[in-house]
Structure formats: structure tokens, C-alpha cells
Image (cartoon, helix red, strand yellow):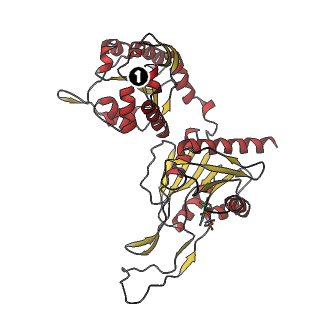
Amino acid sequence: MYLQGKKIVLAVTGSIAAYKTPHFVRLLIKAGAEVRVLVTDAATHFVSPLSLATVSRQTVLSNVSDGATWNNHVELGLWADAMIVAPCSANTLAKLANGICDNLVCAVYLSARCPVFIAPAMDEDMWLHPSTQANVNRLHSFRNHIIQVAHGELASGLIGEGRMAEPEDMLKHLAHFFSDDNKPLKGMKALVTAGPTYERLDPVRYIGNFSTGKMGIAVAEALADKGAQVTLVLGPSNEHTYHSLINTNHVESAREMYDASISAFKDAHISVLAAAVADYRPQEQATEKIKKKESDLILTLIKTDDILASLGKIKQPWQTLVGFALETNNEMNNAAKKLMEKNADMIALNTLRDDGAGFGHDTNKITLLRRDGEPVTLPLQSKADTANAIVDQILELRNAEKTV
Ligand code: CTP
């Protein structure tokens, strides 16, 4: 029932497992989904587009343009509630992981705003090759859902890992994704701050920091994936998110971030403050460009409001408040102090001493400090996995409070 009315784009690529896709399409249609099928040229050696067109009751598309007709990949990417690449050959896997765009499947993948599921299928040695594994990890870190390969007989005659998951299992995977069991935060609101702030000195200069916003955006996406309606208050950042449950409020300065956060906090069940907010701003903001003089320039900086601490003061028992702490020394003590002083329920501690952690990286290593219990140190992992782990801890925290 969870697939009723869902719009699914199925991309079939060149692997023997493609012969199972007409059956998969029938299962999707029976479950109430609307299916559009795309094939690569290689896929057509293994499955007939006519079979796929017949079961999906739609034209099967293979090229960005068919003679005079242009197949609008952007439209398909926006139309879909989910895209599934099944089977995904080693070649397509490598292309998707690296943004190569030489056919319609790749173009739709790059245009898709919906969740993407990838069901790899290849021989075991190809599957286990470090380049394939690196590509899978890369795709996972881009928030694609990897449907694990199955163990069994392979086209080469060998027995091992690399078979595409069975159509019934892929259907279960999709149904679970759309089910309410997978959305424990459905109906709840969340606030996330992310990115740096810029404090203007004059019309051409500012004081800022190296935050990219990646970690906060990953947290917003993890909360939205679990069903929360998220307000993302984002400082100046080149990063984007297109999740349908995330509403991005772009701000520039600490003051703007403070105002937007206070307003979204009122009905937020969960607030995660991941932004690197300026602690000070110039007392004066020149209206004209400050000209160079013989003498040195002395700036007076005044304190900004601490958003986390302000929210900690007005927090209600039904609200969960999580902060970050970026430390370079005496990390645990400083983070524990922030937890208590800012009245947060949890602090995610980042230390710049860990390789692969902190600003700009796609990975992070954090320790979670709660008021109760021992600190939990997570492994170095993608920011998406780190964000999921933070959200799991938040759920645990809220469930624990409910049972007290
Ligand atoms: N924070 C905030 N508003 C500020 C400063 C910080 O909301 N004006 C939040 C951050 O988003 C983070 C937490 O407070 O969740 C800790 O930020 P951090 O920069 O580590 O600490 P500070 O409190 O600024 O203290 P210090 O810079 O001295 O370590």
C-alpha cells in the first residue's frame, strides 16, 4: 500500500539480471505504482524494450533525443518520487559515482531531486574490486540508497556475491522506504542551522569562517528522511539541498541567523545548531569602502547573541536541543561545559585534530555528549552517516524521556 500512486523511474542497464526487470515492473504496477522505464543501449542486449513497454504501459526511453524528439530528463527527474537503477552495471555505477553523463539514464540521475536506489549486479571479482567498492561508497555518501547485492550463482558460472537483489526484495526495500515505520518523525518540525555567517565590515569585506554547511545540511536531510518538516537556516554556503521536506531560509549574518532561528524554534520539536556562528561582529559597518591609510586599522568587535544559549533558555520539555562544539584543545571538558552552560540536551563534539574531520571534508568524526550516560564516539564516516547517527541518538533521547 505504501507504493500506491508513487511515481517510479526504473533505469535498466547492461547486465544479465536485466531479464528480471519486466517481472519487477509488474510487481511495482501491482503495488499501485506508476512506472517509467529507461534503458541504456547495453540493457537492450539483455531485455527487450517492447516487453518493458508492455508491462509498464508506457514508452520505454533510451536516448536524450530520439531524432526530432527531446526526452526531457529534467522533467523525468522532477516527476519521480523515486528512481531505481536496477540492475546497475559496474560501468553505470562508475559513471554515476563520477558525474559522467553520456546517456539518458545518467542525465536523469543527475537531474533527479528524488531518492535514488541503486541495485548493483556484476560478477564477484568486479563487485569486490576496490574501484567498484570506492564507487559504491561514493554513491552512498551522496545519499543514494544502495540495495545490497545477493549471494548466489553468477553469469560466469561461479558462486559468489554480485547478483542483483531479487525483484521481490527490491519491492520490499522501496515499500519500506515509503512506509510510516521508516518515518518516526512524521508530523514533527525541526530547525537546523548550518554554514558560516558573514559579518560585514564595509560593502566589499566581511569577517567569516571556513564552514561549508555540509554537516548541517546532512543533519537536515537525515531529519527530513525520517519524516520531519525541517527549516534549514543556512548561512552563506555553496551547498544546496532539494529535499521536499526541507525549507531553506538563507541568511548572512549572526543577527539574521538569530532572528530566523528564534522564529522557527517556537514550534520545533527538534533543533540542531550546526552553524559556525560569528561570536563577534564589527561595531561599525562602513557604508562606503574603507580606504587604505598610512596607519594600521584598529577594529572594535562586539559580541553577537549566542543562538544556542538563547534557545536553551526558552526550551520547553517537549523540545530537544542539540548543539555542536568545535574544539582544538581540552575538547571533552569544553564540550561538556557547553552542554551544561547552553542548556542543550546533546553536544556533537568535533575536533580539528582528527584527520578527515571538520570544515570542508565529506567525512566527519564526532563524539556525542549527553547529560546522561557516557560519551559515544562515532567512527570516521561520511557526513551523511554521521548525520544519521546523530538523528538516531536524538530519537533514543526522546524515547528515553517519554518512558521516564
Ligand atoms: N553557537 C550559536 N551562536 C553563537 C555561537 C555559537 O548558536 N553566537 C552555537 C553553535 O552553532 C554550536 C555551539 O553554539 O552549536 C558551540 O559553538 P562553538 O563555536 O563551538 O562555541 P562557542 O560557544 O562560540 O565558544 P568558543 O568559540 O569559545 O569555543
The quadrant of the rendering that contains the C terminus is top right
346 displayed left or right of 272: right
Residue 302 point in image, percent of width and height: 56, 78
Look at 38% across and 14% down and name the residue there: 16
Q: Looking at the image, is 379 positioned above or below residue 303?
A: above
Residue 113 point in image, percent of width and height: 42, 38
- Which residue is labeled 1 in the image? 35
Residue at the top extreme?
157
Q: Is disc 1 placed on a helix, strand or loop?
A: strand
Look at 48% across and 84% down and name the residue there: 298
The quadrant of the rendering that contains the N terminus is top right
Look at 45% across and 22% down and name the residue there: 125
Residue 40 at least partly seen: yes
Q: Looking at the image, is 374 positioned above or below residue 100?
A: below
Q: Label 1 sits on what residue type?
A: Val
Q: Quadrant of ligand 1?
A: bottom right
302 displayed left or right of 58: right
Residue 111 at least partly seen: no
